[in-house]
């Protein structure tokens, strides 16, 4: 009796899975590491560094920092707080992007090692939540 074993070409499935993983990782990066308000935060951080180096900073010279004066304090206080927040956010984003890249690379490795469609699909199923 002759036995026939069905074979599946995993290459196109693996390529599609890798494309999906890369797209999902990109979406996770966009969600975790970017926001529409980033240009304002970047401008505030630039103003904060300049204001702290300025011997006589004024609200007119640093309008984005001046916007935070409504909470009280001095321009220097606001500048220090803005820089501290920017450093914390940069560290958070660096950790998030490193974790997303770790998950992406692990998935790609597992996809390439898969020898069965079910294993390939399992390897390509990633929880991208970081919280």
Image (tube, rainbow, N blue to C red):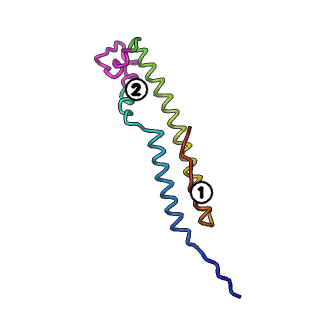
- Quarter of the rendering containing residue 115: bottom right
Nearer to me, 69 or 6: 6
Main SS, magenta region, reads helix
On residue 21, the disc is: none
Residue extending farthest bottom: 1
In the displayed structure, would residue 13 be above or below residue 97? below
Badge 1 is on which residue?
Answer: 123
x and y percentages locating residue 93 in the rendered image: 50, 36
Is 66 magenta? The answer is yes
Magenta-highlighted residues: 45-70
Outermost residue toward the left in this view: 60
The residue carrying pointer 2 sits among few (fewer than 14), some (14 to 19) or many (20 or more) residues within 10 Å by Cα, namely many
- Specify the quadrant of the image occupied by residue 124: bottom right
Left or right: 23, with 63 as reference point: right
Q: Residues within 10 Å of mark 1 (few under 14, many from 20)?
A: many
x and y percent of residue 59 in the render? 31, 15
Disc 1, SS: helix
Q: Which quadrant is home to the C terminus?
A: top right
Quarter that holds the N terminus: bottom right
- Callout in the foreground (2, 1): 1
Q: How many marks?
A: 2
In this picture, is 100 found above or below 74?
A: below
Query: Horizontally, is 106 left or right of 43 in the view?
Result: right
Using the image, tell me which numbered label, if any, was put on residue 45.
2
């Amino acid at each position: 009796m002759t036995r026939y074993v069905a074979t599946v070409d995993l290459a196109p499935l693996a390529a599609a899975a890798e494309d999906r993983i890369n797209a999902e990782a990109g979406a996770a990066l966009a969600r975790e590491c970017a926001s529409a308000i980033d240009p304002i935060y970047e401008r505030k951080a630039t103003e904060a560094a300049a204001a702290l180096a300025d011997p006589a900073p004024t609200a007119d010279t640093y309008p984005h920092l001046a916007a935070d004066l409504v909470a009280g304090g001095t321009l220097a206080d606001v500048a220090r707080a803005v820089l501290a927040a920017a450093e914390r956010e940069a560290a958070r984003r660096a950790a998030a992007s490193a974790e997303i890249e770790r998950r992406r690379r692990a998935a790609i490795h597992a996809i390439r090692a898969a020898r069965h469609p079910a294993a390939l699909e399992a390897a390509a199923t990633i929880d991208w939540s970081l919280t």
